[in-house]
Amino acid sequence: MKNEKKKILFGEFVTGAGLVRALEMGPGKVVAEVKASNLKGRGGAGFPTGLKWELTAKQESDEKFIICNADEGEPGTFKDRLLLMEQAEKVLEGMAIAGFAIGARQGFIYLRGEYVYLKKSLEDAIASMINRRFLGQNINKTDFSFEVEVRLGAGAYVCGEEFALISSMNGYRGEPRNKPPYPSEVGFRDKPTVVNNVETLCYVPYIVTKGAEWFKEHGTQASTGTKLFSVSGDVKHPGVYELELGITVNQLLAEVGGEGAKSVQVGGASGLNVAEKDFDKSICFEGLPPGGSIMVFNHQRDMLHVLKNFMEFFVEESCGQCTPCREGNYRLLEGVRMLEKGECSVRYLKELEALCDVMKDSSKCGLGQTAPNAFLSIVENFKTEILYR
Amino acid sequence: MATGTRAVTNELQEILLKYGKDRTQLLPILVEINNYFGHIDSNSIIEVSRYTGVPIGEIHGVITFYSFLGQKKRGKFVIRLCRTISCDIAGKEQIVRVLEKELGIRFGETTEDGMFSLEYTNCIGMCNNPPAMLINDKAYGGLTPERVVEILDSFKLSEYQDMFGYGGVK
């Protein structure tokens, strides 16, 4: 950690304290506390965690499941890798608390195939937690039992989308499906399921021990808490930073040694490109997308080259199930190739922008809905550079 | 040949027996077969179908969906170089040239001795230490041409040690 100020996740932590406290509070109070904290999902979509738990807790079912989404595939993101490497016990404790809150006895970590080297250490952490009775049968000598198993992905970005992840775990192609029903009703093995991001789960033990009010002291009113940012590209100090939500791009750049940047890609390939004129905007759920990926580009970088890289990514990772995403991304990439050769007219570029709107409105899942973001924002920020070459 | 096939079938059965028969075990089964044999051939697909009850066509559909699974045999060591932007702007192209030159193959190919396959992959979460690649289960970051050669040599050496015992060729 380059960040000097230890905030939440990289502050003090005693394994098991949150879980013991949760067991005293009872499921209802745990859900209420997480809901009151206004914790939002740290995977990118930002769905309120407490609400997700409440909806799943309400379901009557013989089985329920907790899935930790460790399919961290957004370009430029590596904060979950760091948490899984250095703070696996905290992730597992968050899962156990979530399981207790919604009435689940089984949890899974869906680990992306690219991170297979973390499987062994995660299984060691599970064993160590079982030894200390923070996982397994009769946790802390109560009636509550909770097991965790690691499941591997096999190289598919779209499986980070929760419906696709569940399809993958159910033994099908990792394709998203129409909603409703939501995973809170029909999830893994068609049972009520909560899917939470690695980082989201890590905040849970703190919220339970220190309370929702304490958590809300961090961040903004609508975006409570801190956030891990994965910083890469043209900066002096790439790495993972824990910063308060609501931080401006300028403040962030100063922190990481990225002054003098030409543009910053906030939120990964599916996020927004931010040019110098907008560096005073803040990163939070009501501002620039807080997915956590920060990629910095200096003035030597060709933004059309950057855009081409992103579009190649989406063409390859689109699952191909729905037409707007499958065809739309292909056409956008084709447009970028035309721009490269100086063959794209202003009129055609406008047509591509209209296509972006269609993709946003009619794609089935978040991949297709956010894939045009990079195209639209880079074209808008660097029209002259891109169009007249 | 016949005994060879039987040996493969026995190894396959051993893998299958580790797992339950319900559909949720399908991906873990396929991942293990793929990693063990370097690919999932038609015989394996038939056996997995028999074991799990999932139709052959659907198993085929699942295999083709995931980039790490394949029906074509890959090398013993699969090199996956990250091509996403943070690695790209940190000098990925130079690493591409070094890998192709040192191994004598292009991306998408496997060396004749079946040792190395070269592939591109999307972001592997090593953006703080680019350019980066995976070789089977391990990640390597901060690549330079010199380091790539060192890494390749270490894999070749480990192969000699497997074949001739510790210390390589005497």
Image: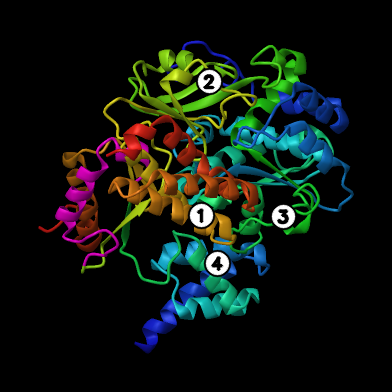
Q: Is residue A363 left or right of residue B153?
A: right
Residue B94 falls inside the magenta stretch: yes
**Between A163 and A266, which is closer to the camera in this rendering?**
A266
Inspect the image, locate mark 3, and give the three-letter code of the amino acid beneath it: Phe
Q: Residue at x 84, y 27 (%)?
A: A32
User: Of the residues shown, which amino acid type is indicated by label 2?
Assistant: Glu
Q: CA distance from mark 4 to mark 3?
A: 17 Å
If you read the primary sequence from the N terminus, does the residue marked by circle 2 or circle 1 appear first?
2
Q: Outermost residue, bottom direction?
A: B2
* Residue located beneath label 4 in the image: B62
Identify residue type, mark 1.
Answer: Gly
Identity, as a three-letter code, of the amino acid under mark 4: Val
Secondary structure beneath label 3: helix
The residue singled out by tag 3 in the image is A188
The answer to whether B92 appears left or right of A213 in the picture is left
Marks 3/2 same chain: yes
Question: Residue A180: horizontal and vertical position, in percent?
Answer: 78, 52
- Residue of label 2: A242
User: Residue B46 lies in magenta, yes or no?
Assistant: no
Q: Magenta stretch: give its range.
A: B82-111
The label nearer to you, 2 versus 1, is 1
> Element type at marker 2?
strand
Q: Residue A378: image x %, image y %? A: 43, 35
Q: Quadrant of residue A194?
A: top right
Q: CA distance from mark 1 to mark 4?
A: 24 Å
Answer left or right for B13 relative to B120: right
Q: Chain of mark 4?
A: B
Query: Which circle's residue, 1 or 3, is located before the other in the chain?
Result: 3
Residue A22 visible from this viewpoint: yes
**Label 1: element kind:** helix
